Amino acid sequence: MVGINQDVAKFVVSYYNWEKQMFLNKITVAGAFMFLGTTAMAGCGISSGNVSILSNDFPAIQAVTAAASTCAGDGVMVEANLTKDHKDIMVAALTANPAQYTSIIASNSTLVTLMNDGLVQSLDALVEKHGSGLKPSQLVTVDGKIMAVAFMANAQHLFSRSDMLEQAGVSSIPATYEDVLVAAEAIKSAGLMDYPVALNTKAGWNLAEEFVNMYMGTGAEFFKPGTAEVAVNNDHGVATLNMLKSLVAYSNPDYLTYDSNATQAEWEAGNIALATLWGSRGGAVLDGEGSTEAVTSTTVLTGAPTWGNNARPASTLWWDGIAISANISDEDAEATFIAMMHGISSDVIKANNDATVWLGDGYTPSAASAGVTATAAGGAAPYPMLPFMGTLHGALGAEISDFLQGSESAEQALMDVEAAYTAAATEKGFLK
Amino acid sequence: MKNRTFFWFILPSLVTMMLFIALPIGSVFIQSLHIEHTTVLKEVKNCGPFGCKLEMQVDVDATSQLKQDSPLGKFNGFGTYKNRNHLAVSELSTAWTNSPTFGVFLSEAYNLPFYRALAFTLTYTFVVTPMVLLLGFCIALGVNSLPKQFKGPTIFVSLLPMIVTPLIGSLILFWMIDAEGILGSTLQWLFEDPNLSLKASPK
């Protein structure tokens, strides 16, 4: 059913996006009016140039691009393409000369992919000229050169329903995945829910991200140090797979189709009590829109759990930030940078405080960001910025669902991951 | 038509077909015999919101020099065709020599991405297509033998799925086969397996 499932899933995703878009359009229009008040007077100070932005699609980024769009005016065009498929189109779009987009909102993983082909430019000069309001910690430097300006942090962490835990006789919010399993069993055996647990386990990128998070919690390395040779087929890898399998045993049988949109909807519908979701969904979950008071008032956001007697939270830290294409004119690069600085200014941060964990000035930590902050404070590691990590992520996404569905052993699944990675990395020139 | 006239008549289509069909196929074939250059890696210091770390990074200058010198990449012959992610020749022959039975060999082959996709396509072709023809024929025969006053409404109802936009149709089916949908939960009840998921079916 794989082929058909994916097609249908795409329809569903595009329907979701359409629905969200309708909703967001309303906000964006309202937001645009709000910003116009300030920008018309202050202006962005751009006299000419084109700005076109490619990015992922979630509320915080909507706010940033909407604010950047207010810089449009005499001789300045601002366009934005917000899509979940940005990862698939970004390399082709930025390889063109001139590039189709002048800016891309990148993350730890996508920035590396772009840098592998030299598709983004150093921002040293632009930051010096126009980046006076930035904090030093927002500058993402690679080999001494500023390659991106991070504006928000994100991580997957635990969402729990305190009322369900209480009714099941669980006294505290689980701090480890072993505790999560105990709590899930308690909720299930108390007859409160059949499937209390959800992770973003959609086969492909999402499922692989869950593996990466869990594996990072063991502190083990993905590759042999200093090489591109994969090293996940070990005791840590097997334990990681077994932990994932124990967790999905408490998930809805359709768990292999669960992405962020699906898990957020399930949470808001009150169908799940323990979930590892993206921090950037926290604001949307808590805002009461699409959910009931009973769910939002008992939703507790805490740091990502640890497991297996390790101290490091089983999650990866992510940043999203602004990168500027290499294949564009200096005029467009400057216009883009100014517009994007406007998009992440402290006014925008203040107006959208709860949308995410902002890194810039003007941000006040809130309940929606407690989970990400706790995960970072707990010592979670950032997602590895390795050139070949994306290839491994792809191999994981394709091969580990066989194990979760019980059609092969953990060792066999990891052997398949390594074989698929090795073949793909050889084609890409990372391995000889 | 004279040969000469015929030649001039088809020349425009011939040229466009050469340009947009034949040449790209040839180009893709030549490219498929090459893989990317061995990337030059260097260890650099990466800093960001979460601190600094020494990590491997692509040496873009050195790598792009390699690319400039030979843009096609490294010649690899039929290596890409034969590797595990495609025809998996060596994996298949190992499985053949090591498998005690033909069944074990088949399941090993089924674990390889290309052969799994092939098996899916073949199953679809030989199971679904005949079923569609046969069932359609049965419905047609059934409708034909109905009394006249029921014929019109029955034809209308049986053709309804064809009228619905494919996108809406597949969306409806997607919801119906959900573990909580009418088909999904009926199947779970029928097979007494609460973990049955049609949507996440591995095959």
Image (spheres, helix red, strand yellow):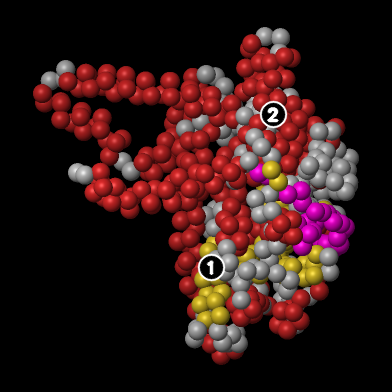
Q: Which residue is tagged 1?
A: A80
Q: Which mark is residue A403?
A: 2
Residue A93 found in image quarter = bottom right
For the point 76% across and 48% down, the residue is: B38
Mark 2, other Cα within 10 Å: few <14 / some 14–19 / many ≥20: some
Q: Which residues are magenta?
A: B34-63
Q: Secondary structure at mark 1?
A: strand
For the point 62% across and 39% down, the residue is: A203
Chain containing mark 2: A
Drawn side of residue A427 relative to residue B186, left or right:
right
Q: Is residue A239 above or below residue A35?
A: above
Q: Nearer the viewer, residue A215 or A85?
A: A85
For the point 29% across and 36% down, the residue is: B162
Chain containing mark 1: A
- Give residue A348's position: percent from left, percent from top: 63, 75
Drawn side of residue B53 relative to residue A93, left or right:
right
